Amino acid sequence: MGELSERLDACIAVENMIAEIYLDFGNRFPGAMSFFRELSKEEENHAAILAIGKEFDRRGKLPEDAVPESMPHISGSLNFIKGVKERIKGREITLKDALEMSLSMEETTVESYVQEILMKETDSRVIKSLQRLLLEERSHIDRLKEFMKERGL
Ligand SMILES: [Fe+2]
Ligand SMILES: [Fe+2]
C-alpha cells in the first residue's frame, strides 16, 4: 500500500465523519433537516468518489498529485472533525452553532482540497471521470453562507 492510498483513506474517514455530523444536525433541527441531509449525502458521495480514486491508485492510474495535501495536514483535518464530534456529543447546540461548526469543517484542508480537485481543470482522464460523479455544483461553503443569510443567522 502506497503513501497515496494512506492519504486517500484518511480523506475518506474525514468525509464519512462529516457526513455523520450533518446527519446528526439534520435530526436536531427539523426545519433544516433537508438542507443538512443533502449535505450529508454529498459528503458520502465525496467518500465514494475517493474510494473509486483508491481503486484507480491500486491499478497505478491515479496521478501522484491527485492528493496534494501531506499526511500531517490530512490528520489535522481528521482531528478537527473528531473534535467537533466530541464537542456536540450529548450536548444542546443552536442552529447557528451547527451552521458555524459546519463552515469551520468545510474550511478544513481535506474539504477544501476535495472541492478544489473536483472542480479543477485537468488533463487527467482519471480525475475527469471522478469529476463526473460529483452530485453538486456549488460549494458547501457558499450554500451554508446562503442558508445562514436566509435564516438571518
Ligand atoms: Fe466533502
Ligand atoms: Fe463539504
Image: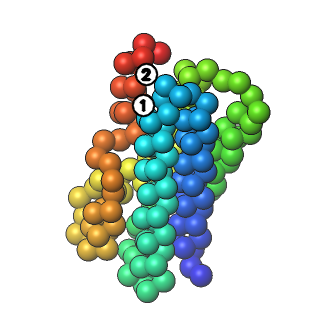
Question: Front-most of 62 and 152?
Answer: 152
| Percent x, y of residue 113 | 43, 52
Picture residue at 48% right of the left edge, 42% below the top: 37
| Percent x, y of residue 50 | 46, 65
Question: Which amino acid does the dot numbered 1 rest on?
Answer: Leu
Say whether residue 109 is visible: no
Dot 2 alpha-carbon crowd within 10 angstroms: few under 14, some 14 to 19, many 20 or more: some
- The answer to which image quadrant residue 22 occupies is top right
Dot 1 alpha-carbon crowd within 10 angstroms: few under 14, some 14 to 19, many 20 or more: some
Is residue 96 positioned above or below 79 on the image? above
Q: CA distance from mark 2 to mark 1?
A: 6 Å
Say whether residue 95 is visible: yes
Q: Is residue 144 left or right of residue 30?
A: left
Residue indicated by mark 1: 144
Question: Which amino acid does the dot numbered 2 rest on?
Answer: Met
Question: Front-most of 90 and 81?
Answer: 90
Residue indicated by mark 2: 148
Picture residue at 30% right of the left edge, 42% below the top: 138
Picture disc at residue 90: none
Q: Is residue 7 left or right of residue 92?
A: left
| Percent x, y of residue 30 | 53, 28
Q: Tell me whether the residue at label 2 lies in contact with that at label 1, contact meaning CB atoms closer than 8 angstroms.
A: yes
Picture residue at 23% right of the left edge, 58% below the top: 121
Mark 1 residue element: helix
Picture residue at 48% right of the left edge, 29% below the top: 32
Is residue 40 positioned above or below 152 on the image? below
